[in-house]
């Protein structure tokens, strides 16, 4: 595995790979690699001949009161995991080579990037869209794998690829969960063991919602309120938002229609740690 830190060098390698007819797959992460990231790498390797993993804690997607400086950066451990996973290239730039002093141009997402998670974290998806586009241009992939764990991010990236005519296939990967149902996340290390057990309520909420829709309950607002109540009744937990969206449009859904697909999106705190999760719910 080759480790690259400079965008120009990564670009030169990617260009050479393309000239040699290599099919390139990219997995973009902020590091602190875990089972979720490793599943994305596996998926990339199943489709692509060469896999590039990027590790970059992107400052432009963090709000001023968020955890940019505390975000875990266990780089040596990440290198070992990436090597063991047989990644071909690890692109791990420093912030100053991605955003040099005179960096000015950024992307602006439309309405999709401004609701739900975008409303709670103003500018977040603009930062995501900008870094993802930059990393696409640096790694020149044919395919890119993103996790369903960040469902709205995935929708924003699909929209971006469509809107900007990018010739890259986006492949989604299912959510990897811990034994108790908690979605694996780099931020889970902030949880105490009690908070970690309590956080399983998010997945329980998704299962409850799926069961209620399965029982022909059509009122999605009522189901979301039940899930919110489940979270509120869990010691140390509080909901931020619990909503259903229409899987096709990513707009708020209030009533289930037979044959349509919905997704429950949740953001909640366990202690001081903000967690997000989601699950697809067919009606
Ligand atoms: P992050 O490092 O948190 O920015 O995540 C990098 C990529 O890994 C994103 O596409 C995430 O959606 C994906 N990812 C994070 N956690 C999981 C998980 N538990 N299961 C599957 N994919 C995940």
Image (cartoon, grey):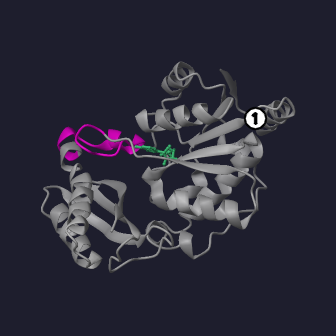
- Near-viewer residue (4 or 37): 37
Query: Residue 34 in the image: x percent, y percent?
Result: 43, 34
Is residue 271 left or right of 164 when viewed as pictured?
Answer: left
| Above/below status of 44 relative to 181 | above
Figure quadrant of residue 49: top right
Q: Is mark 1 within 8 Å of ligand 1?
A: no
- Residue 90 magenta: no
* Residue ID at (62%, 69%): 109
Outermost residue to the right: 19
- Near-viewer residue (245 or 238): 245
Query: Residue 67 in the image: x percent, y percent?
Result: 44, 51
* Residue ID at (84%, 29%): 20
Residue 91 visible in the displayed image: no
| Above/below status of 75 relative to 251 | above
Is residue 275 left or right of 47 when viewed as pictured?
Answer: left
* Residue ID at (26%, 55%): 202
Image quadrant where one finds the N terminus? top right
Residue 233 visible in the displayed image: yes
- Near-viewer residue (121 or 138): 138
Figure quadrant of residue 265: bottom left
Query: Residue 259 in the image: x percent, y percent?
Result: 38, 70
Figure quadrant of residue 218: bottom left
* Residue ID at (38%, 44%): 187
Query: Residue 256 in the image: x percent, y percent?
Result: 33, 76
Callout 1 secondary element: loop
Q: Residues within 10 Å of mark 1 (few under 14, many from 20)?
A: some
Q: Which residues are magenta?
A: 178-195
Is residue 119 left or right of 126 when viewed as pictured?
Answer: left
Q: How many marks?
A: 1
User: According to the image, label 1 marks what residue?
Assistant: 6
Image quadrant where one finds the C terminus? bottom left
């Amino acid at each position: 595995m080759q480790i690259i830190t400079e965008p120009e060098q990564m670009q030169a390698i990617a260009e050479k790979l393309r000239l040699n007819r290599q099919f390139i797959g990219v997995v973009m992460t902020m590091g602190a690699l875990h089972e979720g990231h490793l599943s994305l790498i596996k998926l990339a390797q199943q489709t692509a001949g060469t896999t590039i993993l990027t590790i970059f804690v992107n400052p432009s997607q963090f709000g001023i009161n968020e955890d940019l400086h505390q975000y875990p950066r266990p780089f040596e451990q990440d290198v070992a995991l990436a090597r063991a996973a047989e990644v071909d290239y690890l692109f791990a730039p420093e912030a100053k080579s991605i955003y040099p002093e005179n960096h000015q141009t950024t992307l602006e997402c439309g309405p999709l990037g401004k609701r739900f998670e975008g409303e709670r974290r103003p500018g977040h998806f603009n930062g995501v869209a900008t870094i993802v586009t930059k990393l696409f241009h640096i790694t020149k992939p044919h395919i890119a794998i993103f996790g369903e764990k960040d469902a709205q991010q995935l929708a924003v990236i699909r929209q971006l690829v469509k809107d900007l005519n990018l010739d890259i296939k986006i492949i989604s990967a299912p959510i990897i969960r811990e034994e108790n149902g908690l979605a694996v996340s780099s931020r889970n290390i902030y949880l105490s063991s009690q908070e970690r057990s309590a956080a399983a309520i998010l997945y329980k909420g998704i299962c409850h919602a799926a069961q209620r829709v399965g029982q022909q309950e059509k009122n999605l607002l009522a189901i979301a309120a039940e899930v919110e109540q489940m979270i509120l009744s869990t010691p140390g937990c509080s909901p931020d938002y619990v909503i259903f969206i229409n899987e096709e449009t990513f707009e708020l859904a209030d009533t289930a229609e037979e044959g349509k697909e919905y997704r429950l999106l949740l953001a909640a705190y366990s202690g001081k740690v903000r967690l997000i999760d989601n699950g697809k719910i067919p009606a």
